[in-house]
Image (cartoon, grey):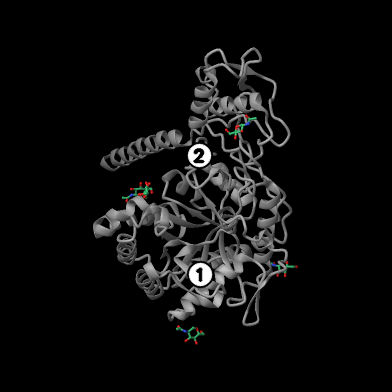
Amino acid sequence: MESLKFVVSWRFFLVLLLSSAAVSSVIGIGVNWGTQATHPLPPGTVVKMLKDNGIQKVKLFDADPVVLKALGKSGIEVMVGIPNDLLYSLANSIQSAENWVAKNLSSYISSGSVDIRYVAVGNEPFLKTFNGSFIGTTFPALQNVQAAIVKAGLSNRVKVTVPMNADVYQTSTGLPSGGDFRSDIRDLMLSIVKFLSDSASPFTVNIYPFISLYEDPSFPIDYAFFDGFSHALNDNGQIYENVFTANYDTLVSSLQKNGFPNMSIIVGEIGWPTDGDRNANLQFAKRFSQGFISHFLSGQGTPMRPGPIDVYLFSLIDEDAKSILPGNFERHWGLFYYDGRPKYMLQMTNSTNGLVPASNVKYLAKKWCVLAPSASIDDPQVAPSVSYACENGDCTSLGLGTSCGTLDARQNISYAFNSYYQIKNQLASACKFPHLSVITTQDPSVGSCKFIVMTQPSEVAVNEKSKALRHSAESLLFFLCLFILAVM
Ligand SMILES: *[C@@H]1O[C@H](CO)[C@@H](O)[C@H](O)[C@H]1NC(C)=O
Ligand SMILES: *[C@@H]1O[C@H](CO)[C@@H](O)[C@H](O)[C@H]1NC(C)=O
Ligand SMILES: *[C@@H]1O[C@H](CO)[C@@H](O)[C@H](O)[C@H]1NC(C)=O
Ligand SMILES: *[C@@H]1O[C@H](CO)[C@@H](O)[C@H](O)[C@H]1NC(C)=O
Ligand SMILES: *[C@@H]1O[C@H](CO)[C@@H](O)[C@H](O)[C@H]1NC(C)=O
């Protein structure tokens, strides 16, 4: 009886908690879960991996029904995303914002019990590479989505935000205290910030020390990390030894200067890639991630904002179908490889020791497609074959300073062939480069350069669909029986 009473009052307490006004968020490190991969792991496998690693918050880039369903009843807090290409219609029609909220928010919160806390409206919409395409639509879309959330009665529970790239603000003095919003978008930024502030919503920013280093070869490398820097900035007695804290405080001072000293801040993305560039490797990624996480766990915050930081690491798993326009490193941001294996030893919390891999991952057969020993690298078919393989496969681990940067010409060609073959699910026809390729069961990997065997394509989407059909057929049958019983 005692235990039953406990259960009852505990339930009651939970209900009270859920129905109380602003629902407080967990303080713990979050991760970005992107799904631009040729072979994404089944969402259920990923959710288990999140739980096994004690990760309690995820940020998504869209509202994929299969992913959201897998997050249902997981206890994991979710930020769902609205991709930039939806901003135009959301900005121009309150009805489409209401449809978005009904379909992608209300339905999951009520029926699927997905713990959605934030909606990210757009993703880095003011990035210079977008040429201003989303300057006119971001703020109206944000307003319409917020209005739709209010109308749906979810505004105490779900907050809107816009993940910004860190160049929406800058400093005129080189020091954090000189921060302000970029002059060409200052008025727009202030309107957005005021709107977020009025709806008790946070400012979200993505901060990338790796990109600072990538774009500026003279960037002092130690300043990107967290283990001391001999030329630390001194800003009126506040010492900055790493670019992350300096950048974060530049935002704090930009907000402060414009009348928003208390606005809460989320770091929407931060991380370090492991391949595709000379500074993208396991050593640097581990040094950065562990340094950042230890800084996070210390709870010290930054000189202008002492205390816990709210943050989502970028990212959970590598995505081999991402655009490489920003650079070859773009497909290698994961803490985990494509198959859910951890890349390096990382202590995510004070009480865990290393990352836990995904469980029960199914691979294709142990075979590889390589350059035939009899083939000559001077064969005129080599160049077009390699370009085809790389365009449709993934050659971002080849090139100077990468994990496969020391391959010789023959191994290079094999790598390209194999990548294409694996991405094509080891289809026999995907290893038919004219007189050049052959299938082998000998692992061609060389040192740090792994020739992968792909994971089995996920059947989840297909299964979910047939399950839903079956489910509705079952309910129909059930109601039919009820009806017959009632009539009798
Ligand atoms: C719900 O989100 C998905 C994924 O982002 C999107 O494709 C779809 O258009 C959204 N639905 C509505 C009604 O806006
Ligand atoms: C931006 O402008 C550049 C140069 O005019 C063009 O190459 C690029 O495709 C444009 N990007 C977008 C997203 O419109
Ligand atoms: C910020 O918070 C402090 C402490 O709660 C409060 O005194 C101050 O009025 C707030 N400032 C603004 C602009 O909201
Ligand atoms: C983790 O350990 C550090 C160092 O012992 C300590 O300062 C910090 O408060 C701990 N953080 C958490 C979240 O327990
Ligand atoms: C291997 O391929 C990469 C990427 O195409 C190229 O940069 C490199 O020079 C090649 N190496 C050899 C030895 O051919």
Residue at (62% x, 41% y) in the render: 337
Residue 278 location, x and y as percent? 64, 46
Return the mark for residue 37.
2
Looking at the picture, does residue 225 appear above or below residue 468?
below
Mark 2 element type: loop
The local crowd at label 1, few if under 14, some if 14 to 19, many if 20 or more residues have their Cα within 10 Å, is some
Q: In this orientation, does residue 108 appear?
A: no
Check residue 265 in the rendering and tell me which mark sits there, or answer none: 1
Give the quadrant of residue 201. Answer: bottom left
Q: Looking at the image, is 219 positioned above or below residue 278? A: below
Quadrant where the N terminus is found in the figure: bottom right
Q: Position of residue 486 (x, y in %)?
A: 29, 43
Between 405 and 43, the residue placed more toward the observer is 405
The quadrant of the image that shows the C terminus is top left
Q: Would you say 235 lies left or right of 390 here?
A: right
Horizontally, residue 146 falls left or right of residue 226, namely left
Callout count: 2
Inspect the image, locate mark 2, and give the three-letter code of the amino acid beneath it: Ala
In front of the other: 349 or 286? 286
Q: Which residue is drawn at 48% across and 75% down?
A: 254
Residue 250 visible to the viewer: yes
Quarter of the rendered structure image containing ligand 4 = bottom right
What's under tag 1, amino acid-wise? Ile
Q: How crowded is mark 2: few (under 14 residues within 10 Å), some or many (20 or more)?
A: some
